[in-house]
Image (cartoon, rainbow, N blue to C red):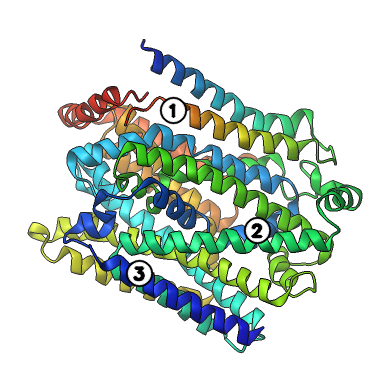
Amino acid sequence: MTAGLTAALVLYALIGVGVALAARRGLGAGASEYYLAGRRAGGFISALSYGATTYSAFMMVGLAGLTYAGGVGALGFELVYLAGLGLVAIFGPRFWLASRAFGFITPAEMLSHRYASRWVGGVMAVTACIFLIPYSAVQLMGIGYLVSAMTDRVIGFEQGIFIGAALALIWTLAAGMRSVLWTDALQVVVMLVSSLIAVGFVLAALGGPAAFLASTRADYGEWLAVPGPGLFSLSTFIGLTVPWFFFSISNPQVSQRLFTTESLGAMRTMLLGFLVLGFVYTLISVIWGFSALQLVPGLDQPDLATPRLLATAAIPAPVAVVLVVGIIAAAVSTVDSILLSLSSLAARDLYRPLAPGGAREMLAGQAVILVVTTLAIVFARLQLDLITVLSVAASSGLLVTVPSIVGCFFWRRGTAAGAIVSMVGAGVAVTALQLSGTDPLGVPASVCGGALAVGLFVAVSWLTRPDSARAEAFLAPVEEGLARHRIR
Amino acid sequence: MSDYRRRANRTLAGLAIAIVMAYALPYGLLRDQPVWAAAFLVWLLFGVGVIALIARLVSDWQP
């Protein structure tokens, strides 16, 4: 296994580096070229990259583990996320039209302009860094654990972290969004094909699909029920799904993709392509988790379901090797997109307002990529519980940016003070609730944070004076474009 | 109101109903049913349904 996995990782890295370097050809100068691939991304490659960025190692490890522990609720949880892509149908064209009209590179820059305050974008950029750096660290930790477990520690935990970080760093620095798009497309194919083959083998080991359905029903019927073995109570389900539903507009590494497509037609292809890809990958991950219940029953730690399943005779060693590479690809493709997005946020929304004329902005952005990678490595090596908590809290933490994003397009009365107070106040509150494990009056912390963000945004906006002229100037080209393209 | 806006409103309403049903059916009518043809089937149909509704929502776009 060790020799095979090492060879597969070397091959994967070499092909990826080749693809990333090839993406450098045709790379122009400037922030738009580097961070948004010159706003010329095609629909098909954008769909593949959106899938690779969204789906991390969580799917075949975490979601499979959730299925193992909690049953069918895991399917509902992930499909509610997919329904949240309806928000892309509403906000996608608005983001795209605004970015074409005003030249925005980051979603935070868009908020700064709309609310006529650079503080708004700055707060959003800081919020993203606080939650997404730990999230990246956990992805690297996942690679470390997986590689060390599969090679009997011949490749150690720390070496695994460095391998993942190095690949993400090279693929981001090579050509920015262009190399991320190209390597993501390669990686999502590895993720999907490897998981499809692997799930085929486990179903075969269980006697085929019909026998799998029958034995699950007979021996693990409780896992098919809701709330099931206990993990997915209605309260937990709501707490998990609400921030997940808004993921497509709250997480900058995916919402920034709404600026990159060459046309609204390409955005439509991206959206529909991703929906099909996401549906298939979700089903694969859930079936994988149900299969683990039968092939490796009785595990105390559900997150070990995938590594243990890979060690059984049900999966031939070459298939296990390919699947491990697929899971690593899922993690690396998420980390590199986050690196690029945080780099653009730091350069455009934190550095540029402080540096007159935005001198050396690109250099600052690339320095940020190095700093963020170093922080992610340090956090991953420390293996602090706090990092894991912040990572889990990432989707709830970023949910607090949603009212300001919605208000950007749908509430002219929204103000900069309202946006800042809602992001800071609700961000601090939801982090404190998550760290202390408190659900006030039984209401999940994520829902409390989201409700508080809405309340603060509305209340403070009413108490402060809106910049109506800026709101009108911002919305005019967006509304004209929506009518021209026949978009609701 | 123009045709495409009316159609989009209807589709958005359908999407909202589907999302409410994705919570209400498994945790209400089909609670504690240990069979594939309960929560699993509902969520599977929900997934297919939302893809169809979102596809309908963007089909009127004129890029």
| Mark 3–mark 2 distance (CA, rounded to whole Å) | 26 Å
Question: In screen coordinates, is A367 left or right of A69?
Answer: left
| Mark 1–mark 2 distance (CA, rounded to whole Å) | 30 Å
Q: Quadrant of residue A321?
A: bottom right
Image position of A225 with respect to A468: above or below: below
Are discs 3 and 1 less than 8 Å apart at CB? no
Q: Amino acid at mark 3?
A: Ala
- The residue under label 2 is A196
Tag 2, which secondary structure? helix
* Category of crowding for the residue at label 3, using alpha-carbon neighbours closer than 10 angstroms: few (below 14), some (14–19), many (at least 20): many
Classify the position of the N terminus of chain A by image quarter: bottom right
Label of residue B59 in the image: 1
Question: Where residue A453 appears, x then y in whole percent?
Answer: 42, 39
Q: How many marks?
A: 3
- The residue under label 3 is A20
Please report the residue visible at 84 percent of the width from the left and 40 percent of the height from the top.
Answer: B35
Any part of residue A243 in sight: no
Tag 3, which secondary structure? helix
* Category of crowding for the residue at label 1, using alpha-carbon neighbours closer than 10 angstroms: few (below 14), some (14–19), many (at least 20): some
Q: Amino acid at mark 1?
A: Ser
| Mark 3–mark 1 distance (CA, rounded to whole Å) | 34 Å
